[in-house]
Amino acid sequence: MHGRATRSRARLSVVRWAGALMSLSHLLAQAATEPARFDFSRPAMGTIFRVSLHAPSAAAAKVGADAAFARVDALNRVFSDYDLQSELMRLCHAEKMPVMVSDDLLSMITRSLEIAAATDGAFDLTTGRMTQLWRRSRRQKELPSPARIAEAKALTGWRLVSADAKARTVALEKTGVLLDLGGVAKGRAADEALAVLARHGISQAIVIAGGDMAIGTAPPRESGWPVQIRTGAAADGKGEPLHLRLQHCGVSTSGDLHQFIEIDGQRYSHIVDPRTGLGLTTRTACTVIARDCTTSDGLATAMCVMGREKGMAAAARSGGVEMRFAEATATGDEVFSSSPGFPEAAK
């Protein structure tokens, strides 16, 4: 009897080991067939574009990444306000209106006008004159004169732009209006890079452009791409980062974590308030999650201008948009406010 029990336990042990070995073999086979991760980076649009993707081979990954970066470079030649030969700048300096434009510029201006309308002008694509003034102020560390601000304000207002989708034209209603797509250009470029990767058969990918992320399908056996968000509204500019796992969305964070200047003892953000012509002075940052990165990019900028109360109301009116505000307190700490559907931190 004792011998039969010993043999039974032995057979059971063998079966368990065989099962474990089969499970291990299955996991190894699964890992061998899963696409590997590849990472690429390249400077563009005044920041570093980073692409992480899963592809069946290094060669396929490189072909897809090169095509994605080429698309970003092409869009920069359309949207740049630093390059006088960009399509955007040629439009601004055209002698006659309306001007026939490319599909890329038409769709970008059309979307910018939609975001401007949805945010009551807190996002404004006509702030080019203000942006130029503020860049000069940041370099020279002195505020622009009231007269120069007044001149810039006279040439600012998103209703000064009209786009005709049927005729494929754009018109500026005043001579001297200068467009600035800096609040949405990186988001659109990230979206387009992600779309290029998808056309190359690579859907498990994320494109990061500074504070903007276009996120595709999650990596193998993961619920989403790991995303770390740091707002910098705390007095030390640090604060605890928020960790999320996300897929199929755009994520953007805007604030004065890295880009700010102090003039006469006052801290100013790089974000220009269309109402004043100056950089924002409130220590606030906003993270927006939307269906695409073009939307999240434009709204993150606008939310910083609108502030928490109006921003939350705008999010409630916009379908599929979630946001999280970080505001500095008098003691230098951060206070967070999130819309109801903002995801919880990853564990």
Image (cartoon, rainbow, N blue to C red):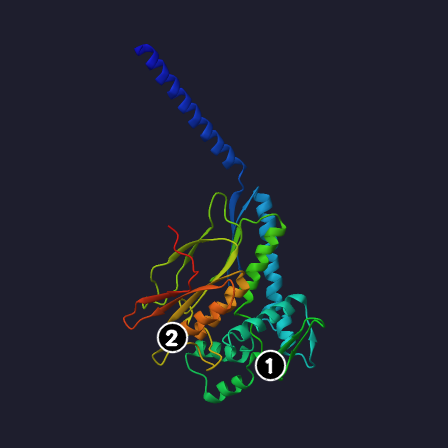
Relative placement, left or right, of 178 versus 94 is left
Instruction: Tell me which corner region of the image, top left, top right, bottom left or bottom right, holds residue 75.
Output: bottom right
Residue shown at the point (62%, 66%) measured from the top left = 77
Q: Are marks 1 and 2 in contact (CB under 8 Å)?
A: no
Residue shown at the point (54%, 77%) measured from the top left = 128
Instruction: Tell me which corner region of the image, top left, top right, bottom left or bottom right, holds residue 195.
Output: bottom right
Distance Cα–Cα, label 1 vs label 2: 28 Å
Looking at this rendering, what residue extends furthest in the front direction?
A: 1
Looking at this rendering, what residue extends furthest in the right direction?
A: 167
Quarter of the N terminus within the rendering: top left
Q: Can residue 210 be seen in this view?
A: no
Residues 242 and 255: in front is 242
Q: Mark 2 points at which residue?
A: 282
Residue shown at the point (39%, 52%) measured from the top left = 346
Residues 102 and 302: in front is 302
Mark 1 is on which residue type? Leu
Vertically, is 253 above or below 151?
above
Name which of mark 1 and mark 2 comes first in the sequence: 1
Relative placement, left or right, of 273 versus 56 is left
Q: Can residue 1 be seen in this view?
A: yes
Kind of element beneath mark 2: loop
Where does the image place residue 62, in percent across and percent down from the top left?
58, 48
Q: Mark 1 points at which residue?
A: 160
